Image (tube, grey):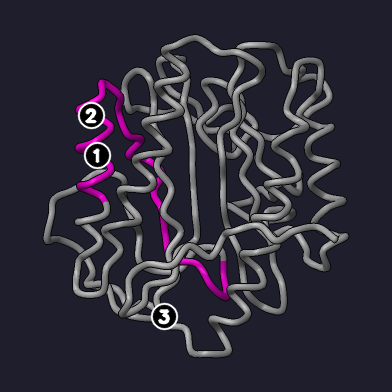
Amino acid sequence: MSVIPLKNKEGVARMREACAIAATVLEQLKPLVRAGVTTQDLEEAGRDWIARLGARSACYGYQHGSRRYPAHTCISVNEEVVHGIPSFKRVLREGDIVSLDIVVWKDGYVGDNAFTVPVGPVSSALGKLLRISREALDLGIKQAQVGNRVGDISHAIQQFCEANGFSVVRDMVGHGVGVSMHEPPEIPNFGRKGTGDKIKSGMTLAIEPMVNMGAYKTKTLSDGWTVVAADGSPSAHFEHTVLTTDKGPEILTLPRPIV
């Protein structure tokens, strides 16, 4: 089992601030998702909102192997699961679905959240994919109870998605989050009840179902970042950062009103 950081009172306070900013940026971007907009337009709006709220992107310059991520946001369209790189060449069309993944640093702590937005009316099949993926996140969060195990979160997400005819991505997982973007434990979206690390009070967990309409296998494009469904099927991604407490899980990534 991994050693999972537990947040003290100060750490929780800083996590609340970072997560509120991440959630507020995400909330500001959602209504900008419409036909004719480019993913780079969304990137620039996200970059500006992060700066306006006194934070910085945890994505920009993030290093994986020899590559550094070149944008402030991750924007993934249709079959793109995660880590889509914004571009002026990618113009949104009615019927698309767009995952907005916003991760920020603030005073040494990270807030992380994601939401998949439809571009105008979408097909009933895509509507179901979005609904089930969002509900799977809620079910996973409910299992983040002190005394449970990570596998209880994983199992709840997998069973619900598969019972509704979808598959959960296995190459990418949720994770702890705090002073870095990725901390222990890993939180797969598949697994067995009663397995994995035991959940204790004071954990901050990024729970994030990534759900494909087709098979669960993925591949990474030649840019070294963009992960897509291997069969080209649409994919949805929803994420919250959650604090575990003796009173139950608390969602930290809730937006603040803009004054």
Q: Is residue 249 above or below residue 227?
A: below
User: Whole-percent x and y of residue 163?
Assistant: 20, 27
Which residue appears at 57% of the width and 27% of the height? 221
Give the image quarter of residue 121: top right
User: Whole-percent x and y of residue 98?
Assistant: 62, 28
> Badge 3: how crowded within 10 Å, few (<14), some, or many (20+)?
some
Q: Which residue is mark 2?
A: 162
First in sequence: mark 2 or mark 3? 3
Q: Which residue is mark 3?
A: 5
Kindly state the secondary structure of the residue where label 1 is placed.
helix
Q: Is residue 224 above or below residue 208?
A: above
Magenta-highlighted residues? 154-180
> Nearer the observer, disc 1 or disc 3?
1
**Quadrant containing the C terminus in the rendered view:** bottom right
Which residue appears at 29% of the width and 78% of the height? 200
First in sequence: mark 1 or mark 3? 3
**Quadrant containing the N terminus in the rendered view:** bottom left
Closest to the observer, 142 or 42:
142
- Cβ atoms under marks 2 and 3 closer than 8 Å: no
Q: Which residue is mark 1?
A: 158
Which residue appears at 25% of the width and 61% of the height? 150
Q: How many numbered marks appear?
A: 3
Q: Is 107 situated left or right of 216 in this image? A: right
> Badge 2: how crowded within 10 Å, few (<14), some, or many (20+)?
some
- Cβ atoms under marks 1 and 3 closer than 8 Å: no
Q: Mark 1: which amino acid?
A: Gln
Disc 1/disc 3 C-alpha distance (Å): 26 Å
